[in-house]
Amino acid sequence: MTTGHFTAQHPYLSALGFLCIVVCVVLGIGAINEVFLMGSLVQVAVVDSVLTLTGIFLVARLGWWEKAGYTTGIRWAEVPLFVLPGAVALLSLSGGIRVTAPATVLACAVLTLVVGFAEETYFRGLILSALLPTGVLRAALISAVLFAAPHLLNAIGGTWDPAFTVVDSIAAFGLGLTFAALRLRTGSLWPLVGIHALFDFTSLVALGGVEVHAQSVELLVSSVIVGMIFAAYGLFLLRKTVTGVPGHPAA
């Protein structure tokens, strides 16, 4: 049985398999970091570089360039769909910027583009595509859950405050649902790579690093609210029959 046949016959197992690759890479590089003390930013760069390479290999192996959204561009009429997530991404800058050195800002931009490409390749490219035979809405919801779950790993080693980690995972579910809906509505992965990178870039330059310490109750509540807004927006985008998804009729 070829890889393509397996994913077609076992969409849930395939999606979990892709997720396992992500988790194994994150945990494996994390263990290496404990020995060689690469630093958090270097660890992120290595993790997402590995995910980028393995993701491209899997897409090529499956022949999913079109199916995963690599060959479709965005149309001008679809640009307004990205206004809400883009505006929310910029909110991270409302509290000020800690990273101002041009070279460091450029490095952050490159790093977050790699992160955006790697994560979108796996979650909206491979995992969402694998789940589409089960139905559009179900695929979007499950892919959002699988996108949120690995965020819990940020609490390992004290990188993130536990309370913020839980809240961020809730927000990630909502954002994952919106991203899945946008991927299905537009058929393209590329704008999601950009929006994803924007979210990470604004957070990185605002915080000055990847570590997140204890946050105020107000911020935690606002993060949950943002997650709920994104979940509602994703469902709103999915309210009509989704067309233009290569090889997968709407369900």
Image: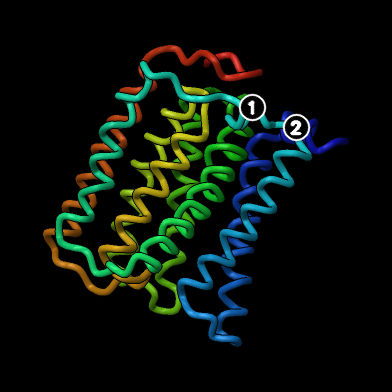
Which quadrant would the N terminus be assigned to in this image?
top right
Along the horizontal axis of the image, is 57 left or right of 173?
A: right
Q: Amino acid at mark 2?
A: Gly
* 138, 59: nearer the viewer: 59
Q: Secondary structure at mark 2?
A: loop
Give the residue drawn at x 72%, y 29%.
8
Label 1: few (<14), some (14–19) or many (≥20) C-alpha neighbours in 10 Å? many
Q: Secondary structure at mark 1?
A: loop
Give the residue drawn at x 52%, y 49%.
119
Give the residue drawn at x 30%, y 72%.
161
Q: Which residue is mark 1?
A: 67
Q: Which residue is mark 2?
A: 63
From this view, report whether residue 32 is shown above or below residue 115: below
Give the residue drawn at x 44%, y 12%.
241
Labels 1 and 2 touching (C-beta < 8 A) = yes
From this view, report whether residue 131 is shown above or below residue 161: above
Residue most toward the front?
Answer: 102
Q: Position of residue 93 (x, y in %)?
A: 21, 55
Q: Position of residue 118 (x, y in %)?
A: 56, 50
